[in-house]
């Protein structure tokens, strides 16, 4: 039966057994009580002096709220075992596994309340559903703060902000990664990259003093971030992300090349050459091959290395 108790109540304490002096359940108008006792087979040691304690009767029933049964709140009515120490005469009861001390709601119910937060319901509805007070729901919500909010309250010397596509489940498609620029560790994920969201995030999580410590912010070239960073990190220098600089330069270079092709005409000798060898123009000049000569159809099949080709292209414009 003790397995059934665990199954029904979610309390997995082996010392809880059914109370044989009573009925299994006591039915009331708006709740049910499962009658149990706390039973220890092995002696307990006195926390004060270490002597073995002896049993000293049971407490009156304490009610522990468990998950609902048959749509009615279910309480586990437990008569706890009292102990007394013959040496120092201190008395003691021992806690129940799965229930916090001085609390009448089982951890299992609290966990369910926390899980319920992912559904869009009000605190009042949640409180009603689990037969607890709104204050309990509030406390459950607050208890999750440490686990959900892994943000360290301090900021490193240099941070990097990078946006990424976080999928369509979230209202804002683009989210923001907050990275420690020195260690490349992710500090946090900020759900939205919008100005208001970023502002409220940093104001909420980091004190002004912490933000003033930040000396460098590495970010892409998106203009609206500039003001935001100046406001939030008054002592920080903005460093443009290398990747975005390279991206910007290569885009401009490509569009310039296309403009030059248009100027010469698509069918012209220059236009065709600029079109064919575009990859060589994009290459780092130190990485151009100057050892291997190939016949180049665009230059009257002359034997030219990659470097020669680039030089000829640059002579055109
Ligand atoms: Zn003692």
Image (spheres, rainbow, N blue to C red):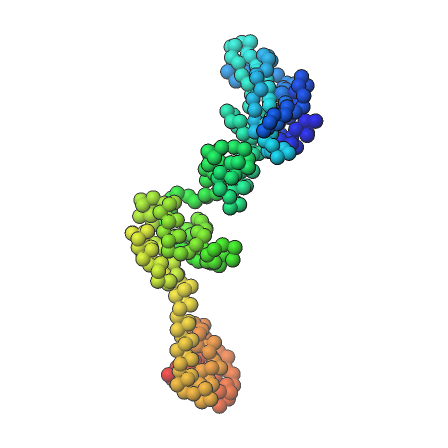
Q: Which residue is found at the position 51% from the left and 36% from the top?
A: 127
Q: Where is residue 60 in the image (x, y as percent from the top left)?
A: 57, 17
Toward which corner of the image does residue 66 lie, by quadrant? Answer: top right
The answer to whether residue 156 is visible is no
251 in relation to 73, above or below: below
Of residue 6 and residue 266, the one placed in the foreground of this image is 6
Q: Which residue is found at the position 63% from the left and 33% from the top?
A: 69
Q: How many labels does the image show?
A: 0
Q: Position of residue 228 (x, y in %)?
A: 33, 55
2 in relation to 306, above or below: above
Q: Which residue is found at the position 40% from the left and 63% from the top?
A: 242
Q: Which residue is found at the position 51% from the left and 58% from the top?
A: 168
Q: Residue furthest right?
A: 1
Q: Where is residue 315 in the image (x, y as percent from the top left)?
A: 38, 84
Q: Which quadrant, please, contains the N terminus?
A: top right
Q: Which quadrant, please, contains the C terminus?
A: bottom left
Of residue 66 and residue 168, the one placed in the foreground of this image is 66
Of residue 257 and residue 95, the one placed in the foreground of this image is 95
């Amino acid at each position: 039966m003790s397995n059934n108790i665990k199954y029904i109540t979610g309390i997995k304490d082996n010392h809880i057994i059914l109370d044989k002096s009573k009925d299994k359940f006591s039915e009331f108008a708006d709740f049910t009580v499962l009658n149990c006792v706390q039973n220890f087979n092995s002696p307990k040691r006195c926390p004060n002096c270490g002597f073995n304690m002896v049993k000293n009767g049971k407490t009156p029933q304490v009610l522990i709220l468990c998950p609902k049964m048959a749509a009615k709140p279910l309480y586990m009515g437990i008569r706890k075992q009292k102990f007394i120490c013959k040496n120092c005469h201190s008395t003691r009861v021992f806690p129940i596994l799965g229930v916090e001390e001085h609390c009448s709601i089982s951890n299992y119910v609290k966990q369910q309340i926390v899980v319920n937060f992912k559904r869009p319901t009000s605190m009042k509805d949640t409180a009603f559903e689990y037969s607890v007070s709104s204050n309990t729901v509030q406390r459950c919500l607050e208890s999750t703060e440490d686990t959900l909010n892994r943000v360290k309250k301090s900021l490193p010397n240099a941070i990097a902000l990078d946006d990424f596509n976080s999928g369509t489940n979230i209202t804002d498609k683009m989210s923001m990664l907050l990275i420690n620029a020195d260690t490349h560790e992710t500090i946090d994920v900020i759900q939205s990259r919008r100005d208001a969201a970023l502002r409220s995030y940093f104001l909420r999580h980091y004190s002004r003093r912490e933000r003033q410590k930040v000396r460098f912010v590495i970010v892409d070239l998106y203009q609206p971030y500039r003001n935001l960073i100046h406001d939030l990190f008054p002592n920080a220098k903005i460093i443009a992300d290398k990747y975005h600089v390279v991206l910007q330069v290569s885009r401009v270079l490509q569009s310039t090349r296309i403009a030059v092709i248009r100027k010469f005409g698509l069918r012209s000798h220059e236009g065709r050459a600029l079109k064919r060898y575009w990859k060589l123009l994009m290459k780092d000049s130190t990485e151009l091959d100057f050892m291997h000569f190939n016949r180049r159809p665009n230059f009257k099949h002359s034997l030219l290395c990659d470097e020669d080709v680039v030089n000829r292209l640059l002579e055109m414009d």
